[in-house]
Image (cartoon, grey):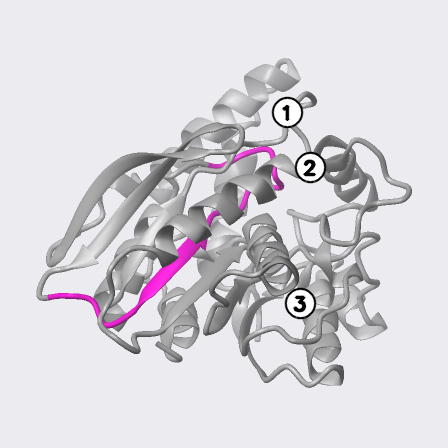
């Protein structure tokens, strides 16, 4: 189906907002101000029925902030959730973290721990973000849950890569394995797989793209190089057998959709049960927008259905 009207209006608004020109910094500030108004404040999202608590746990590189979400009336399972942001951006206050976690808790009746892993900044690099997520996973698995309650690990975009890498580390080094992997539009491969010719035509008019240069820049910032990239940094290159059942949600209009599609095929090849969902009309990062958008809500429901 066509790109959702919500995103075409957003693109037009961005163009109008930055029309005055100026330096890159000035245009960036104008774009940021527009997006803040257009998308809305995630912290204003209705959290009725969900208790929220900010805590800090110890990690191998120092304190790790977590935001916990518990449905009133008790939890029947748990999720550790990792926001996206290309390994270098994002925080606990963004829609993809805060609003998604509220909705997971509300829709599935599960406890959610959203993890503020350290971001790659040219000094902090791989494997520090994975170390943080792995430490948060081990801590979360030690918290009380009803006997037999499922516990999942998941994330969006770069956060999906960190969740998958943590599941691989747990498989190889021990600890409680997740009962499910919940992956939204994962950034799991470098180089990013090529889109099909048909998809390339559909994507040609999209204003927001992941260019090869942009993907290379993200990997350089995260790993420090683009050659000899460790298999678990972009874990589509890793051995993937022995993982828990996976759910993969992809955005229809997204250069990284090719990574989600390839990851699904890889998991099937090694016998990992996997289900997928294509969010029609959506662009990359659609969980950073309101669940009032039907496909955002459908994606949230699809991811937590296992729980």
**Would you say 293 lies left or right of 198 here?**
left
Q: Is residue 137 magenta?
A: no
| Residue 290 figure quarter | bottom left
What percent of the width, then of the height, locates residue 307? 35, 76
The circle drawn on residue 260 is 3
What percent of the width, then of the height, locates residue 65? 37, 34
**Would you say 262 lies left or right of 118 here?**
right
Residues shaded magenta: 74-90
Residue position marked by numbered label 1 in the rendering: 121
**Would you say 230 lies left or right of 59 here?**
right
In this view of the protein, can residue 287 be seen by the observer? yes
The circle drawn on residue 126 is 2
Q: Is residue 110 above or below residue 48?
A: below
Residues packed near mark 2 inside 10 Å, few (<14), some (14 to 19) or many (20 plus)? many
Q: Nearer the viewer, residue 110 or 244?
A: 244
Which residue is at 26% across, 55% downward?
Answer: 102
What percent of the width, then of the height, locates residue 106? 22, 65
Q: Nearer the viewer, residue 28 or 267?
A: 267
What percent of the width, then of the height, locates residue 200? 79, 65
């Amino acid at each position: 189906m066509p790109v959702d009207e919500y995103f075409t209006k957003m693109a037009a608004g961005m163009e109008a907002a930055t029309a005055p020109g100026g330096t890159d910094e000035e245009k960036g500030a104008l774009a940021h101000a527009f997006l803040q108004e257009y998308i809305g404040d995630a912290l204003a999202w209705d959290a009725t029925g969900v208790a929220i608590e900010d805590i800090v746990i110890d990690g191998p590189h120092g304190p790790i902030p977590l935001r916990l979400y518990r449905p009133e009336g008790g939890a029947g399972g748990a999720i550790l959730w990792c926001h996206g942001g290309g390994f270098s951006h994002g925080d606990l206050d963004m829609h993809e973290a805060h609003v998604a976690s509220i909705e997971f808790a509300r829709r599935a009746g599960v406890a959610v721990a959203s993890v503020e892993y350290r971001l790659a900044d040219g000094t902090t690099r791989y494997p520090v973000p994975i170390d943080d997520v792995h430490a948060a996973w081990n801590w979360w698995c030690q918290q009380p849950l009803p006997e037999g309650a499922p516990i999942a690990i998941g994330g969006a975009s770069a956060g999906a890569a960190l969740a998958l890498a943590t599941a691989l580390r747990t498989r190889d080094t021990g600890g409680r394995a997740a009962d499910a992997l919940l992956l939204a539009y994962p950034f799991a491969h470098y180089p990013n797989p090529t889109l099909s010719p048909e998809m390339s035509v559909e994507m040609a008019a999209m204003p927001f793209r992941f260019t090869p240069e942009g993907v290379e820049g993200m990997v350089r910032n995260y790993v420090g190089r683009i050659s000899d990239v460790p298999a678990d940094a972009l874990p589509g290159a890793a051995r993937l057998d022995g993982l828990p059942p996976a759910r993969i949600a992809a955005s229809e209009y997204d250069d990284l959709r090719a990574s989600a599609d390839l990851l699904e095929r890889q998991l099937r090849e090694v016998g990992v049960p996997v289900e997928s969902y294509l969010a029609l009309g959506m662009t990359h990062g659609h969980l950073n927008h309101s669940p009032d958008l039907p496909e955002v809500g459908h994606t949230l429901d699809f991811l937590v259905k296992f729980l």
